[in-house]
Image (spheres, helix red, strand yellow):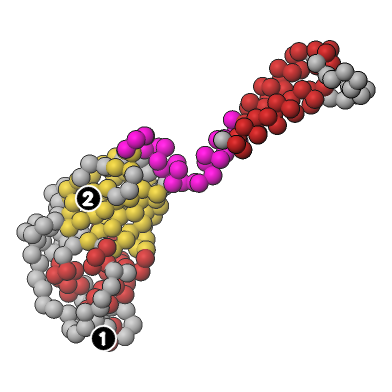
Amino acid sequence: MTALAGPAPSASAHPFGPPSTAGAGVQGSRLLIAWNTDKLDWVALGQSLGVFGGQGGGANSSNLSFTQRLQESPTIRSYLLKHITVAQGGHPCHGAVVGEMRDFLARGAQVAFDCPAPVTAVDVTITSLTDLHPAYRTMLTSTGPAQTQPTLFTSAQPTAHVTFTASGGSVRRTVVVFAGGTVAAALAIGGFVLWRSRRRKAAQAVGPSAVAAHAPTGSPLPPGSDSTAHDTAPAEAGTAGTRSNA
């Protein structure tokens, strides 16, 4: 992000322009919201919080550009966490500003919410800037494979129940894939174990005599050997070979 040197420009609230934006992306049980607004609105917010006067900035803030003061201000982070909240099933999702607000004028302030379960439906509340003027509003849209309908947040309707669905499949499939890369592998292993168990039971049902009848001539089964191992091992090896060649 290019730091604009010099004192903060003077700005007053101008809520009648395009709405602020909130890009929502689902990553398993995490909802990431990138909130952004016009540069002059950022300045107006910083002024209202005292970021440029010193009391709302970080250490040595007087030596920083106005964008750096906004970026490093703990007051701005606290404001975002107060005015953007997410709840799932009546339980609040823990929020944190991530990414150190790098390039926030272009990418927005990244706020991550960790919820108790994979995110398919949550209650989102956005009141950013409405404390400066009630005409401010924010449009939420989706980013990534989990999709949701565009939702407008206003001072009159600051909370909305947001449901995510996935193109090409259910949202649960999408969020489970994000939640753990080993899920698909675990399902594959579980299916293989079930298949092998059924094969072994089928071999036991046939009995040792039938297995012995199919044994190669001159290679009798040694006493006490497990007949099912002789029957299932070739089948499993053949199956493994098929998977490796697939």
Residue 190, magenta (yes or no): yes
The amino acid at mark 1 is: Ser
The CA distance from mark 1 to mark 2 is 34 Å
| Dot 2 amino acid type | Leu
Residue 141 visible within the image:
yes
- SS at circle 1: helix
Q: Position of residue 79 (x, y in %)?
A: 26, 65
Q: Nearer the viewer, residue 110 or 48?
A: 110
Q: Mark 1 or 2 closer to N-term?
A: 1
Task: Write the residue at 27% across / 83% down.
Answer: 64
- Asked if residue 181 is among those painted magenta in the image, a careful observer would answer yes
Q: Which disc, if any, is residue 140?
A: 2
> Does the rendering let one see residue 45?
no
Closest to the observer: 167 or 124?
167
* Tag 1 residue: 62
Q: Where residue 226 is drawn, which disc sits there?
A: none
- Tell me the quadrant of the picture where the N terminus can be found: bottom left
Q: With 228 as the anchor, is 117 left or right in this view?
A: left
Count neighbours of disc 1 (C-alpha within 10 A) and say few if under 14, some if 14 to 19, many if 20 or more: some
Callout in the foreground (1, 2): 2
Task: Give the residue at x 84% y 16%.
Answer: 212
Pointers 1 and 2 in contact (CB under 8 A)?
no
**Residue count near mark 2 (Cα–Cα under 10 Å), binned few <14, some 14–19, many ≥20:** many
55 left or right, relative to 11: right
Q: Which region of the structure is painted magenta?
A: 167-191
As drawn, is 200 to the left or to the right of 25? right
Q: Report which quarter residue 49 is drawn in.
A: bottom left
Count of marks placed on residues: 2
How far across and how far down the image is residue 67, in percent? 24, 75
Question: Image quadrant for the C terminus?
Answer: top right
**Secondary structure found at label 2:** strand
